[in-house]
Image (tube, rainbow, N blue to C red):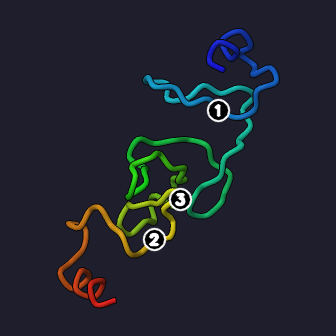
Amino acid sequence: IHRYLEAFPDGGHFKGANFVFDKRAQMRGDGSVVGRCGECSAPWDTHHGGRVCTVCRALVLVCDICDASSEHGEYWCPEHSKFRNSYFHFLDRFSEVDLQSQAAR
């Protein structure tokens, strides 16, 4: 895909963005957005390094609006979504009262 987008800067037949592991982060073809935010399902296809699954650390698509409104900045990939609101990595973001109420569940 990388070489294809270099050969066809307008995207050719490629739709969406190609994630690359350098300062560019992604290469865009025709500019179309084919992904969706994992939190609100809004069209979104920009990966950010800090937006990863709390369980497996895989990159997840989370839009800027959902990231800004996230209470704890933790997200879950589709495979681990069943752990939402029950498994957290960053315990320092919770008060003692929060942790006690979670333990009581």
Task: Give the crowd class for mark 1: few <14, some 14-19, many >=20 residues within 10 Å.
Answer: many
Closer mark to the observer between disc 2 and disc 1: 2
Which amino acid type is shown beneath numbered disc 2? Arg
Under circle 1, the secondary element is strand
Closer mark to the observer between disc 1 and disc 3: 3
Tell me the residue that label 2 is attached to.
84
Closer mark to the observer between disc 3 and disc 2: 3
Residue in the picture at 70% in, 41% down? 33
**Outermost residue toward the top in this view:** 7
Task: Give the crowd class for mark 2: few <14, some 14-19, many >=20 residues within 10 Å.
Answer: some
Spatial CA span between label 2 and label 1: 28 Å
* Quadrant where the image shows the N terminus: top right
Q: Position of residue 38 (x, y in %)?
A: 57, 58
* Quadrant where the image shows the C terminus: bottom left
Foreground residue among 62 and 105: 105
Under circle 2, the secondary element is loop
Task: Give the crowd class for mark 3: few <14, some 14-19, many >=20 residues within 10 Å.
Answer: few
**Outermost residue toward the front in this view:** 79
Asked if residue 41 lies left or right of residue 85, the reply is: right
Tell me the residue that label 1 is attached to.
17
Q: Earlier in the sequence, mark 3 or mark 2?
A: 3
Tell me the residue that label 3 is attached to.
79
Which amino acid type is shown beneath numbered disc 1? Ala
